[in-house]
Amino acid sequence: MLSVKNLIDTNSLTADDITQILDTAASFEQVNSRAIKKVPALRGRTIVNLFLEPSTRTRSSFELAEKRLSADALNMGGSTSSVVKGESLADTIQTIDAMNVDMFICRAKLAGTPQKISENTDAVVINAGDGKHQHPTQAMLDLYTIRKNFGHLDGLKVAIVGDLKHSRVCGSLAPALKTMGADVTLVAPPTFQVDDPQWFGCSQTSRLDDVLEDMDVVYMLRVQLERMEGAAIPSRREYNRLYGLDEAREKRMKPEAIVCHPGPMNRGMEINTEVADCARSRILDQVNAGVLTRMAEMYLLLGGENNGVSA
Ligand code: CP
């Protein structure tokens, strides 16, 4: 069992929680490789997918994970709910809660929305990305991918590169990596650096070329153009020159080092096509791990083996 009721952020997760999620996800590998990809683990459970902001990877992998666990899913978007008529979030959640659902999965533009939902329901809440705050299920799939590649997480040198300031991915990934004993270096232009206390324990630099050759994992962040106010970077081309992972930089990485990116990518900005699609890229492995780790999170948070049905 996990030590948390809800999965809102990674700061609340212990190393044991993260290990349970990754080990349970690994046990679902064989389910996902079968012709019939379904187990009865969450049969009779009702999960609400409340996506108030666009998503391709997170939404589709949660929906697939629910189907593979035999859960019943209710899909809600902001534009098709009574939120557009002015209903408050609290009223919406209490209304759905009155129908006896078991779990809310929430993606929202506004940071703090999943926490607010948890204050209006006894159902379990999973944060599927809230504003610039956190994206904990992205961090779990990232850790799964990295652990599967190296066999461990402790002692690995990981650079998280780019738009730290607007990134909920970094907000979840950096603390989770630290909890698992990795050595995290944050790399960003001065306008994208963060000065929040949660980054204590991570090294920081604005010079990618100084640290690149020492890293086991180079994790490129999407430049969050939609979350920017004003011009934080000079130009796409200049950003690519200073911070983009191009073929010349890729060739300087350690032979066994890997490249990750959460998607969606700005090809030609933070990462060039020849690197996104090269042998060291684990970007599609990350997508694959998204289904496994989200199955594990829902399974564990809804009672796991105590459901009376094992995975
Ligand atoms: N990485 C990620 O959250 O992608 P989506 O926005 O497509 O879900």
Image: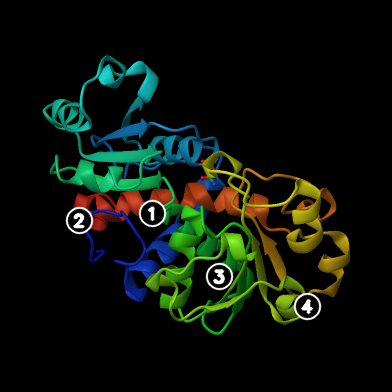
Please give left or right for residue 11 compared with residue 237 in the image.
Answer: left
Q: Nearer the viewer, residue 167 or 227?
A: 227
Dot 3: few (<14), some (14–19), or many (≥20) neighbours within 10 Å? some
Please give left or right for residue 295 compared with residue 37 in the image.
Answer: left
Q: Position of residue 157 (x, y in %)?
A: 61, 79
Q: Nearer the viewer, mark 3 or mark 4?
A: 4
Q: Position of residue 56 (x, y in %)?
A: 54, 35
Q: Which residue is mark 3?
A: 147
Query: What amino acid is found at the position of numbered circle 2 in the picture?
Result: Asn
Q: Quadrant of residue 21?
A: bottom left
- Judged from the image, the secondary structure of the residue bearing numbered disc 3 is helix
Q: Nearer the viewer, residue 162 or 306?
A: 162
Q: Nearer the viewer, mark 3 or mark 2?
A: 3
Q: Which residue is mark 1?
A: 296
Q: Position of residue 292 (x, y in %)?
A: 48, 51
Q: Nearer the viewer, mark 4 or mark 2?
A: 4
Lower sequence index among marks 4 and 2:
4
Q: Residue sitting at 28 percent across and 37 percent down?
A: 43
Lower sequence index among marks 1 and 2:
1
Dot 1: few (<14), some (14–19), or many (≥20) neighbours within 10 Å? many
